[in-house]
Amino acid sequence: MISLARKIYSDSFVQNSFVFFVGSFIVAVVNYLYYPVMSRVLSIEDFGEVQVIVTILLQITVVLNVFGYIAVNLFGNLEDEEKRTGRVRNLEGAAITIVAACGLLALAFSGYIDSYLKIGSVLVVATLALVFVVNVPFTIKSAWLQAQSRFKEISLANLISGSAKILLALPLIAMGLGVDGALFGLIAATFLSLAFVSWRAYTNFRLIDHLGENYFRVIIRDPVVRQDLRYGALIFCALFSINVLYSADVILVRRFFSVTDAGLYSGITVIGRIIFFSTFAISAVLLPSIRLTATARQNSRNLQKALLLTILLDGFFLILFLVSPETVVKVLIGSKYLEFSGLLFRVGLFILLASLLNVLFVYAIALRKMFVSLIGIVASVSVFALSYLNNASIPAVVNNFIIINALALSVTAAYLVLSRKRTGAVATEA
């Protein structure tokens, strides 16, 4: 038993996972303080609006995560420093160009977006566009830290962001600014976290380096940049689908039901998402540990560790949601959200399935097995289609997410097993 414990302790994947998990757990506590605090200082309707804003931010952050995944892959697999620096610099410049174009497009359609999601503040789309652009250099610098296994710095950057968005928003909300006060907190937190990673990451990339470059022309003329962006497009499909499968329920409930019911349900999903974010660190550690140059057995072992850790940690929360849902809701966000406490276990279940699916997707992305992108696209379309057909009640929408997540997880697992068998068969014949 002692030798087994020593072996587990000396495992670099477990060590990195533990370090990042502890850091992420502290960050998660701070981030989740945001919701109990906001649920108490805002009205149910305003809290529901803030939750929709955070959900939209999660969706657009997927685009940033795509560039981060590519950067981690480049930092971890390219030995030539000059070539690596050039490719990542071009990637950052292309990312800023693409994200800025998307932000301007969103601003052009801001009226429609506000109307569709029943958003009251006129600053929402402008705030999200600004946060979107500023997070590009943050993402690239965080990728450098991640590739270097400097998970403490990443956790500290996230801690700064999580603390700032609460502490800087509260005085403004107390002054009567409501949702706009919360938006200011998000903007300030974004700039503060960027300042920290700029200090800690030695990428030698500066914003001024991109100002004289026409990255639209670079994208058109440079085949290497286009190759990275094609890979990024596939990663986007995979990651965006994960976001849809664990968080789009809030948007759908907001669309189909009253603003008050959507606000109450948002409180339940805030708690349920503890399951996803408590183990998100595991997939972040998994990504740089899976290498194209490693053996299939080494990569498979790291995947198994990631899945086991995810099941153990998330399973604990899921059992808690089953045994004491009312107590959990009352302690975390207050008794006024108890009406939907009976949904907590089911919400937690589909988020657990999405967490496991995320681990499998990250593993496949690292090995460039991009068929998972197609699985993700089909799953995302399916959950929206099923919810438009079956939305007689909020529990019905939750059941749709359970069904689609379970099917997507099963198909992905089968694909990876068959893919490994085919790879093994080819290697044997060779």
Image (cartoon, rainbow, N blue to C red):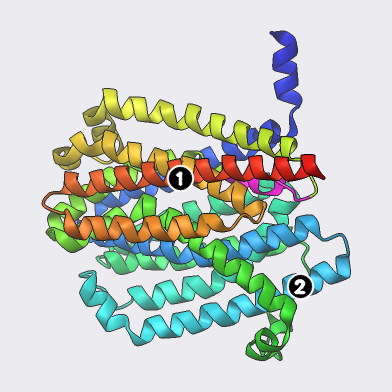
Residue stretch rendered in magenta on the structure: 283-292
Residue 35 on image: x %, y %? 33, 48
Residue that appears at 51% across and 34% down: 310
**In which quadrant will I find the C terminus?**
top right
Q: Where is residue 43 in the image (x, y as percent from the top left)?
A: 19, 56
The correct choice, above or below, for 98 with respect to 372 in the image is: below
Q: Where is residue 222 in the image (x, y as percent from the top left)?
A: 73, 83
Q: Residue 87 carries which label?
A: 2
For residue 203, what is the image quadrant?
bottom right
Residue in front for this viewpoint, 405 or 336: 405
User: Quick check: 258 left or right of 122?
Assistant: left
Quadrant for residue 168, please give it.
bottom left
- The residue most toward the front is 429
The kind of residue tagged 1 is Val
Which mark is on residue 411?
1
Looking at the rendered image, the disc whose residue lies closer to the viewer, 1 or 2, is 1
The structure residue drawn at horizontal position 48% and vertical position 52%, both measured from the top left corner, is 162
If you read the primary sequence from the N terminus, does the residue marked by circle 1 or circle 2 appear first?
Answer: 2
120 and 253: which is toward the camera: 253
Determine the residue positioned at 58% across, 58% down: 370
- Compared to residue 162, the image places residue 233 above or below, namely below
Percent x, y for residue 246?
38, 50
**Could you classify mark 1 by the number of other residues whose Cα lies within 10 Å: few (under 14), some (14-19), or many (20 or more)?**
some
Residue 286 is inside the magenta segment? yes
Residue at the farthest top position: 1
- The answer, for residue 211, to whether it is visible in the render is yes
Q: Is residue 65 left or right of residue 113?
A: right
